[in-house]
Amino acid sequence: MKILIVTATWKESEPLRQALGDCIPVENILFRYRLNDKVIDLLVTGTGMVSTAYAMGQLTGRQKYDLAINAGICGSFNRNIRLGEVVNVVADSFADMGAEDNDSWLPMSKLGSENQDDLLSGDGTFISNPGRFSVLLNHLRPVNGATVNTVHGNAESIRRFSVRTDAGIETMEGAAFMFALTGSDTKFIELRSVSNYVEPRNTDNWNIPLAIGELGVELVRLLKDL
């Protein structure tokens, strides 16, 4: 079995790398590990949807995988989700792709498109595709994600964003990962661990080490169970 794990930063994959041991560098941002009969490639894209989409496009044109996993930390709009909890992002969207119309927000579907087959001409939402691997995610809370260029840290912008979306968490990469794999033969999932709540920016309330540690535990468990 060949598995791809996609993270934005080196730090987010640290516990996983420690568990997997020695790696073989394949390319500048791609590293290969082995776990029993599994080949595990780690792609470190850099932060943000542009870097993620570019790296994924470059890689998926050359490599084929049975399962791809986007893994990282996130902010949560839902305070019922504890810090460090790993969630299964079942849908993700380019949540700030659209246009402002005075006090209203227009998604891409309202702006019109010359190409109706364009995946971005709708509401910019993508659905995870775990296939037969879905049974391994049943213990995780399912949430909707929002992928943004600017993470929220202002009370008024958080309020307005929450009114127009049903997102439980926000990231800067998730929808780009799903976009790159939608329509492909590769099954794909997004796992995120909550490092902070979405609120007026206060890094004293964040717990990034906890989130990264719990993410690593879940990834190792999943890889062993595959």
Image (cartoon, rainbow, N blue to C red):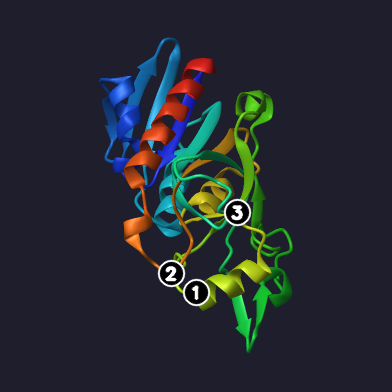
Q: Is 100 located above or below residue 16 in the figure? A: below
CA–CA distance in space, label 1 to label 3: 16 Å
Judged from the image, the secondary structure of the residue bearing numbered disc 2 is loop
Return the residue nearer the eye: 10 or 164.
Answer: 164
- Identify the residue position indicated by label 2 in the image: 200
Image quadrant containing the C terminus: top right
Compared across the picture, whether 5 is left or right of 136 comes to left
**Tag 2: residue type?**
Pro
Q: Residue at x 48, y 16 (%)?
A: 224
Judged from the image, the secondary structure of the residue bearing numbered disc 1 is helix
**Tag 3: residue type?**
Gly
Q: Residue at x 65, y 78 (%)?
A: 105
Which quarter of the picture shows residue 140?
top right
Return the residue nearer the eye: 162 or 53.
Answer: 162
Rendering coords of residue 186 (x, y %): 59, 33
Residue located farthest toward the bottom when viewing the structure as drawn: 102
CA–CA distance in space, label 3 to label 2: 17 Å
Specify few, some or many for label 3: CA neighbours under 10 Å numbering under 14, 14-19, or 20 or more.
many
Mark 1 or mark 3, whichever is nearer to me: 1
Q: In this rendering, does residue 61 appear at all?
A: no
Rendering coords of residue 182 (x, y %): 63, 45
Q: Dots 1 and 2: beta carbons under 8 Å? A: yes
Rendering coords of residue 13 (x, y %): 34, 36
Judged from the image, the secondary structure of the residue bearing numbered disc 3 is loop
- Identify the residue position indicated by label 1 in the image: 155
Mark sitting earlier along the chain (1/2): 1
Q: Residue at x 50, y 63 (%)?
A: 148
**Disc sitting over residue 146 in the figure:** none
- Identify the residue position indicated by label 3 in the image: 168
**Tag 1: residue type?**
Ala
Q: Dots 1 and 3: beta carbons under 8 Å? A: no
Specify few, some or many for label 1: CA neighbours under 10 Å numbering under 14, 14-19, or 20 or more.
few
